[in-house]
Image (spheres, helix red, strand yellow):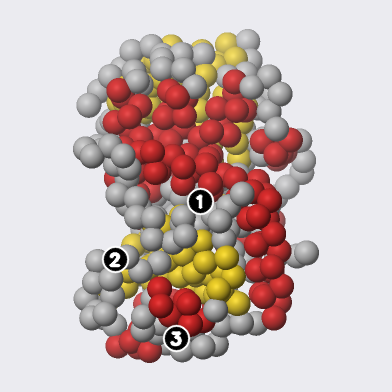
Amino acid sequence: MSNIRDAKIVIIGGGAVGCGTAYQLALAGETDVLVLEKEPSVAAVTSAQAAGLVGQVRTTLERTQIAMRSVKTFSELQKDPKTNPTWRQVGSLRVALNEPRVEEFGRMKAVADRAGLEAELITPKAAEARWPGMNFSMARAIIWCPTDGYLQPYDLTASYSAQSSRRGVRFSLNTAAQQILIKDGRVTGVVTDKGTIQCETVINAAGAHAFHVAKLVGLELPLVPVRHEYFISVPCDGLAPEYPVIRIPDVSLYLRTDVNALLLGGWEPNPLHTDPRKYALGGNPPGIQPDWDVLAKFAVDLVPQFPKAADLGVRSVFKGWPTFTPDGRFVIGPTQRVKGFVMAGGCNAHGVSGSAGIGHHVVESMLESSPSPYVRSLSPDRFLNSSWTWDNAQAGASRIYAEYYGVSKP
């Protein structure tokens, strides 16, 4: 599908964030939008590798609200019988195994209450009723959020695409951005392998290539691809698709059912990262081979809660390079350096689950005369107006990944 012609707004990247942003722009009345994707389909790279878990209970009000907005959007998209995100609102259980985590759960429950999010501290017996066969006897506290769930990343991105197209947004697949044209400090167009597009605004939603797209306008941003992987087991008796998502942060694990199998992933203490300067815009990040030691440790760490994990074979492994930032915050919004250039990257593994909320914040940063302090804090200019090194950036991004389930400070 090629739809090359001039547009007011060009989005580079057809993953969940790019398509989610296109959808939010369309809802805001901006329909002269063109999404460029270098692959033959949307959600073909990082988004396709995501586990699709959607959790709203967070440690800050802003992040909780982003997730709540996304859930609201997913529920609305699910109403379309032909193009929906396969949204399963099965709820989630977050399990604490030690006292510091119990205290954190209390703070998270307070944040949920402030946000108007339904969340409840429940007993192990109540949790076992929701997931028979899971051992919750070691739990010191459990948060139940009934409106959480999971979806299929490709289906979500295709749903965004379909809904956006109905509102006038165009998509050009198999189209690679090669150059961004600038005149008098302002974006004027994009050169692609299919021709040149005149435009007023470019939104960089290029995922693991967001660093390279930013470099096209002279910006160097610490967007560090960090490896993440999970596996889906062979079929296992006793698992049902209506079982809730489970997160056990004290052992850095998350899991859900996948029809009659188990999807299991986690966060490594010493993650593998790559340097985006070592591959080009037209190239790809390094290939990823399954790290069987890491995947096996996920299963071993789950055994106390789910003994069957010791005997589960692996059916398939998913892995990708989500981008992390050294401060753990998204990179969203315009830059003062180049008018008309807008970032939508550095999603810290929230690109799929937070795509609707992230897209909304991108739109707010572009169209609102006075964006919220939180949205302003995500500006790419925070890295352009401060000194940083790649060594520090990669160390910081790896730390954010490793401490993804770290206990938050009061």
Quarter-wise, where is residue 290 in the image? bottom left
Q: Amino acid under label 1?
A: His
- As drawn, the label of residue 350 is 1
Residue bearing the label numbered 2: 241
Image position, residue 342 (x, y; %) = 57, 28
Is label 3 in a helix, a strand or a loop? loop
Q: Is residue 74 left or right of residue 114?
A: left
Mark 1 or mark 3, which is nearer the start of the sequence? 3
Pointer 3 residue: 135
Q: Nearer the viewer, residue 68 or 344?
A: 68
The location of residue 247, given as percent across then percent down, is 50, 70
Q: Are marks 2 and 1 in contact (CB under 8 Å)?
A: no
Tell me the quarter of the image containing the C terminus.
bottom right
User: Which element carries disc 1, helix, strand or loop?
Assistant: loop
**Element carrying mark 2:** loop
N-terminal-most mark, 2 or 1: 2
First-in-chain label (3 vs 2)? 3
Instruction: Say which of 314 and 399 sits in front.
Output: 314
Counting from the top left corner in percent of width and height, residue 183 is at 58, 11
Say if 306 sits above or below 166 in the image. Answer: below
Q: Position of residue 269 (x, y in %)?
A: 57, 73
- At 41% from the left and 78% from the top, the residue drawn is 129
* Residue 293, above or below 224: below
Q: Please state which amino acid type lies under the numbered disc 3.
A: Asn
Residue 172 visible in the shown view: yes
